[in-house]
Amino acid sequence: MDEYFVGHKAYKIDAKGRISIPANMRASLGQEFIASRGFGKCLALYPMDEWNNFMNKIQTTVNQKDRKRLEFYFSANAEKMSLDGQGRLLLNENLRRQVELFDQSEAEIFGNNKRIEIWNCDLFNEQLNGIDEQEVENILDEYGI
């Protein structure tokens, strides 16, 4: 995948637990993709190539003890999914409960590099507002970016 997912916006979750994925993200996501727990309390959508790369990196670079924990965390919470004809994703009850979306009427869709994240709006804003600008500058300076 050559394109990165960027931006964020709140989208409605309908009574059946469906949420629309932005049109500009659908093509890069692909017909089938993996939905899994993300980092923090979010749901991460990985294009199949990205999921395979991610799992391969875990299998080839992480020691056995940690690898088993990571594989269990991500794979046990993963599901192969696709969008319906209107570009909506059906968020099953289990996944919605895990990421605090079960009783929510909307969620934040966040294009985070090579994956799409779906967040509880309050949790997303907490994360976003908790980032200190000076800390970001210091990190960039540290890596010469």
Image: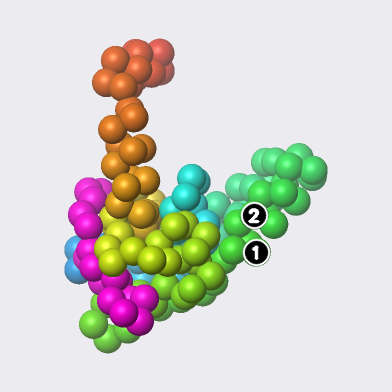
Residue count near mark 1 (Cα–Cα under 10 Å), binned few <14, some 14–19, many ≥20 = few
Q: Residue at x 21, y 54 (%)?
A: 9
Residue 119: x and y in percent read 36, 54
Amino acid identity at mark 2: Tyr
Q: Residue at x 33, y 28 (%)?
A: 131
In the rendered image, which quarter contains the N terminus? Answer: bottom left
Amino acid identity at mark 1: Ala
Most common SS among magenta residues: loop
Q: Residue at x 30, y 52 (%)?
A: 121
Residue 116: x and y in percent read 36, 56
Magenta-colored span:
1-22
Residue to which mark 1 is pinned: 76
Residue to which mark 2 is pinned: 73
| Left or right: 129, with 57 as reference point | left
| Left or right: 4, with 101 as reference point | left
64 shown above or below 78 = above
Residue 112: x and y in percent read 34, 47
Q: Are marks 2 and 1 in contact (CB under 8 Å)?
A: yes
- State which quadrant residue 141 falls in: top left
Cα separation, mark 2 vs mark 1, equals 6 Å
Q: Is 123 covered by the magenta stretch?
A: no
55 shown above or below 130 = below
Question: Mark 1: which secondary structure?
Answer: helix
- Residue 21 visible in rendering: no
